Image (tube, helix red, strand yellow):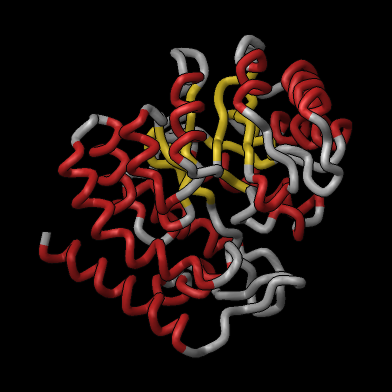
Amino acid sequence: MDIRGSICALATPFGDDGALDLPSFGRLLDHQLAGGTQAVVVAGSTGEAHMLEHDEFERLLAFAVERVAGRVPVIAGTGEAGTARTVAQTRRAAALGADAALVVAPYYVRPTQEGLRRHFLEVAEHGGLPVVLYNVPTRTACDLLPETVRPLRDHPAIVGIKEAVATDERIQALAELARADFVYLSGDDGTAGKAMLAGAAGTVSVVANLVPQAFRALCDAATSGDREATARAHERLDPLVQALNCAPNPIAVKAMLPALRLGSAQLRLPLLELADGPDRARLHEALAALASLAAVA
């Protein structure tokens, strides 16, 4: 299993009635595979994981595993606020055929660094899947520090980290932790090129839902160390990446799914659909501009 390069944090399409829309999810998966995406994350934060019922999680993940059919790794978001619940969800994902688990730092409960260390070791020891740590303090209210990550790398089931803190200092600290059996993945589209040039093996991306081919081009350029090609790819993508920041993820990316016939903009409460107005217009303009550039290329 090779978790690197362009990795899409998949949105979860819902129908107008609020139910899972598996036909649209299938088109989204096909869109990723055709665009060169190298792994997919199912039921992460972009996939509204915490709005899914247990049976919906199982149906969604089983569908993805069957549709992808081993062509790229399928990574399941299994993180919960409690350790026992996280272990149980990770075991469930393993039984459904996931290749790895993306395990977010426990949210809301605000554990200490020692609590985080013990939490991830328990999941690695008993969850039954390779574990990719996920640090996103803006969502969890706790920060998995590099000094806590360092010893966690020694567990054979802990294979990497998705890091959403995008400061230069954090990028450098995580790049120094990367090694053959432990990958550093960026979790921030806006600084993905910088992180990969510094040593990240890839990026778990939101914008890749919409433009997988363009994001793959950025990842290929950056992971090969081509700074000029990375700058060009970033310049093309950045207007859309910035436009997606108009609302909390995944509100904006789901607003663009209908334009690509990949599903509705429907979300589940407490998330609300992006209203018509300047933000939505800017998103459409950025997406259309990127499509025009791709057509010329």
Note whether 178 is above or below 163 in the view shown.
above
Q: Is residue 137 left or right of residue 66?
A: right
Q: Position of residue 201 (x, y in %)?
A: 40, 29
- Residue at 65% across, 30% down: 145
Quarter assignment of residue 264: bottom right
- Residue at 30% across, 59% down: 237
Along the line of sight, the residue nearer the viewer: 53 or 140? 140
Note whether 275 is above or below 88 in the view shown.
below
Q: Is residue 173 left or right of residue 55?
A: left
Q: Residue furthest front?
A: 169
Q: Quadrant of the C terminus?
A: bottom left
Q: Is residue 54 left or right of residue 21?
A: right
- Quick check: can you spot residue 205? yes
Counting the numbered discs, the total is 0
Q: Is residue 133 left or right of residue 29?
A: right
- Residue at 46% across, 20% down: 176
- Quick check: can you spot residue 263? no
Q: Position of residue 142 (x, y in %)?
A: 74, 41
Note whether 46 is above or below 273 in the view shown.
above
Q: Position of residue 139 (x, y in %)?
A: 69, 52
- Residue at 50% across, 19% down: 177
Quarter assignment of residue 203: top left
Along the line of sight, the residue nearer the viewer: 238 or 267? 238
Note whether 76 is above or below 257 in the view shown.
above
Q: Position of residue 33 (x, y in %)?
A: 38, 46
Q: Residue furthest bottom?
A: 277
